[in-house]
Image (spheres, rainbow, N blue to C red):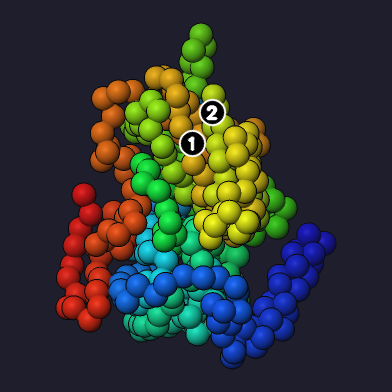
Amino acid sequence: MKQTILAGICASILVAGFVFYPLLVGNSQSAKAMNVEFTPSGVTKHVTLVTNETVVQVAPDNALHPGGIEYNAYTFNGTIPGPAVAIDQGDNLTITLQNDGKLIHSVDFHAGIGDTHVNSGPVEPGQSHTWSLQGINGGAFMYHCAADALNGVWEHIANGMYGVIVVHPQNEEPAKEFYVSFGEIYNSADQGLFKGTNGTVGSFDITKFATDQPDLVLTNGMAHKYAPAVGQVSKLELNPNATVFNVKPGELTRWYILSPGPNDGVSFHFISGQMDVRDGFNQQANSYGTVLMNDETWWVPPGSASVFETIFPEAGPYVGVDHSMVDVVKGAAFVVVAADNSTATDHPEGTWVPPKGSEYVGGNQQAEWVSSGASGTNQTDA
Ligand SMILES: [Cu+2]
């Protein structure tokens, strides 16, 4: 009976994909139609995304997951998530999708508008495809694999094929910026909390997926990646190799929070902090938008990214969490330490985003860019 229900669900999604896919092909919407004002920069940047199937460690060795957990992931550039891509509003971005894997992969860039700018279309093993989009709206947007014209898109996202693209608004203020994605893992080998997988490398579990029972919620590819421990009197070690976020008390910080799902969103909150939401959909102030000031918790729905700004006024610890508590247990928390000795470049691994005006395109990745017709160069970020 359960199999029948699952087959029905999958068939429904497939039918929806087939129905909607032709509607996505064809006319592009213009920036004018979106009522957005910006100045084309004349800059073209280029990023290469390489797709593959890769075993990734998704949970550290701790009491919750004895021995740690490895998983048969699908990846952009070998990691969950893929590289954080950043351009400035008005830039053009040329994307090359190169498929080094054994399965059909693709990519869908939410920052673009119009099918030919958003979707690569299916790229078969050994093939590549290059296309471009323009950064029209400022903000942070998801990109993800769309599999073979949506057939299997749920599995490819659940297996790790997602990332963020930041379009820096033309009126953006300088700030120390960080990127964190929260993504679910549905693992056929995971026997649950305090049990783990006993060394088995599991794969996508469609029953757990269809019944909304993720085993883990990853922060930039690993549960509790940036959370060393919980508890003061009774301490539970979460990750002995964790790195934490460092900021100066009083400095402006900006957070790009990606909620790739595939099913659940993120109730984002800073313990001991409040934040301003900069999602850009309220244009009453400017194209950047000033939506909510001094908010406590903000819902980032699955399939989107939000931009938050906050100042940590006092020295000491703060914690960024998905305030859905089951997700905290499954990995969705990270530690921020405010201290005067923090520097501008002391970002934890995987959290750096090329800032506005940067010559770099991808965080922690080789980046290529072509400016106003000048020749491209290969760069590696700091
Ligand atoms: Cu894929």
Q: What kind of element bears circle 1?
A: strand
Q: Tell me: 229 left or right of 96.
A: right
Q: Residue furthest front?
A: 285
- Which three-letter amino acid code belongs to the residue tagged 2? Gly
Q: Is residue 192 visible?
A: no
Crowding around mark 2 (Cα neighbors within 10 Å: few <14, some 14 to 19, many 20+) is: some
Residue at position x 54%, y 77% in the image: 31
Crowding around mark 1 (Cα neighbors within 10 Å: few <14, some 14 to 19, many 20+) is: many
Depth check, front residue: 207 or 249: 249
Identify the image quadrant of the N terminus: bottom right
Label 1 vs 2, first from the N-terminus: 2
Horizontal and vertical percent for residue 180? 45, 46
Q: Tell me: 12 left or right of 48.
A: right
Depth check, front residue: 140 or 129: 140
Q: Which residue position is annotated with label 2?
A: 273
Is 86 placed above or below 244 here? below
Horizontal and vertical percent for residue 339? 33, 23
Q: Tell me: 261 left or right of 360.
A: right
Q: Which residue position is annotated with label 1?
A: 310
Horizontal and vertical percent for residue 284? 63, 56
Is 249 placed above or below 37 here? above
- Which three-letter amino acid code belongs to the residue tagged 1? Thr
Residue at position x 26%, y 25% in the image: 341
- Distance from label 1 to label 2 (Cα)? 8 Å
